[in-house]
Image (cartoon, coloured by chain):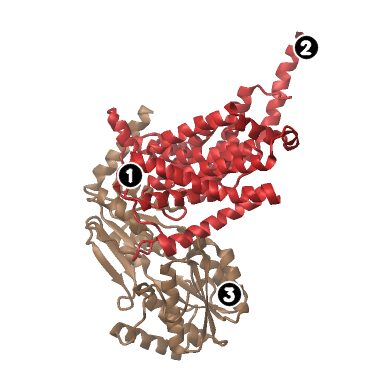
Amino acid sequence: MTFMQKTLGGVAALAIGATACLAEPALMYDLGGKFDKSFNEAAYNGAKRWAEETGNSYREIEVTAEAQRVQFATRLAEAGFNPVVVLGFQNAATLEEVAPKYPDTSFVLVDMVVDLPNVRSVIFQEHEGSYLVGMLAAMATESDTVGFIGGMDVPLIRHFGCGYAQGAKAVNPDITVIANMTGTTPAAWNDPVKGGELTKAQISQGADVIYAAAGGTGVGVLQAAADADVLSIGVDSNQNHLHPGQVLTSMIKRVDNAVFNAFSDGAGLETGIVSMGLPDDGVGYALDEHNAPLVSAKMKAAVDEAREKIIAGEIQVVSYYENDSCPAHDF
Amino acid sequence: MTVLPKWADAILIPLLSILISFVISGLVILYLGLNPFEALRLMVTGALGSSYGWGYTLFYTTNFIFTGLCAAIAFHARLFNIGGEGQATLGGLGVALVCLAVPWPHWTLALPAALIGGALFGAAWAFIPAWLQARRGSHIVITTIMFNYIAAALMVYLLVEILKPEGSMDPATRRFGPGAELPLFSDIFGLVGIPFSSSAPANISFFIALLACLLFWLLVWRTRLGYEIRAYGHSETAADYAGISPARMIIIAMIVSGALAGCMAINSVMATERLVLNSVEGAGFIGLAVALMGRSHPVGVILAALLFGFLYQGGGELALWANIPRELIILIQGLVILFTGALDNMVRMPLERIFLMIRRPGKQGA
């Protein structure tokens, strides 16, 4: 035991000593897992890109339950990693607790704002990106019915769905938007089977374009949609390649850029709120060789015009957060 | 009759089961191209090599002692209470409501109140399936499993719609306030001059869990009620014949069981100073394994809870430092549960044969 204590102490001392000159950054994935092909994987891609470009290494850990967040964030800060990037809105409370204890460590929070001197908060205008894919969905549908499948039923996901419904109704005010949530527990972020079942249910109600904003669950949504030969829309990462020709587009949220920038800025990075939206391509829709046949020039023109108008302030996309309700859909 | 001496049943079989599960886990780690001994070293240093590690290990142990006792009391009445998870969830709600209701002046007042709140809510949640079993014959395994889901859904509704502070997105309550802060190990050991990491959440609840073990032992083996519960567990018809009401035993055993699960919340909720979703973290299910492995005896429960506390904390450290996928940690925990719980006879039967072989020549000689 004493030997182990010494070893561990030595390791800790080394790690702390190393922070002064050469601190490794660390990344904490949230529930859903590193390879969810969506939110967390986008962060992983950003970290990987940084490691490949700079040749440096980073440390990563996956949270498997809510109660672990504080433990793992503390552990990373305690071990001297800097900056520490944490993902997901639910980590706001984590950082409120951990960040003040480690004033010399820079923290980055993706998806939520925490007002602390050593925290950078990166938020995305997801409702604007969702608005654009909602427009595409409304233009692609032949049944005038589009679907939305969310992960866990929380305001963040309603925020996605609300933008989507507004976009769809901007194209066709009479369109039917069906929205379902996968679940009420965090398991809903990683339940592809249930995602597939919900997809089939929505298809039977007439939906022929279905948008999945559900983390790892979305894989099941895209699969079921492809099996039934209807279109789907991916989220966070570009998921067009998962089923080429059957994924209409993906609502891209550049979590990878948020992580890449944080890692590049390194320890002592500039803190405060960083908002990523349409102007800086923080959110947007994906167009590549896999979905090029699905998006006609007319559709693209309409969406690009709407994008410009949103940036210019001519189109106001209402955020669900403004008064916890949505003008275009009743969740 | 029993072939094995008591010590072999209580110690040898669990130890052999753990050994087998560790060997298989080691082989899997080897197959993944990692060094199993290095992995074990990381787990041991991470969980037991520092006061920080101990602080987390004992924090988890506290949870598992409560849920282990919850499953154990039900086992004594031959009831399979799979609802520890839901009962602990509701216990968390009880604790949170108590902590939020009053601006507590000091933890010495807040703790007993929270304990009662948690126990009441846990017991109430266990009472419904118990009543259904006792009066309607609805099988307790099925109803308690379903009540776990109801508890999870109820918690989401309450946290998202009611308890969440205005303007917050995170489905969690506000902080309980300084008056409800429990003394951590660093505070307690600091009184006698022993330094302990202040980042670790182990707190006074650990000692309450130990006290609960003592009370459990007194209840089960030293009171009339405990005797009745065990009698009912051994034979319902015999107990009925002896004038023990089966319905009463089911309901009482389940209420005690649920209350014990609910008490876990003083550690998992009160010590973390706010109620989050999924604060139980599967401890309700681990409790079943703890009770099976601990032979439904408080001492066994403490030891088994310590083992699982070690696996939880060591597993987290392993995931951090060795970049081992989290699924592997679950695999190791699953193997331990499989061998200690489900495959008990696989170790027991050969062991019995060995003991018989040793004993037989001796008997013939006498």
A130 is higher (above) or lower (below) than B142: below
What is the number of the mark on residue A296?
none
Please tell me in which quadrant of the rendered image residue A315 appears.
bottom left
Real-space Cα distance between discs 1 and 3? 50 Å
Q: Which residue is mark 1?
A: B181
Chain given the colour brown: A
Chain bearing tag 3 is A
Q: Colour of chain B?
A: red
Q: Which residue is mark 2?
A: B364
Q: Which residue is mark 3?
A: A225
Please tell me in which quadrant of the rendered image residue A122 appears.
bottom left
Residue B26 visible in the shown view? no
Q: Would residue B107 be found to the left or right of residue B296 on screen?
A: left
Residue at 28% x, 52% y is: A99
Residue at 61% x, 55% y is: B146
Residue at 57% x, 87% y is: A143
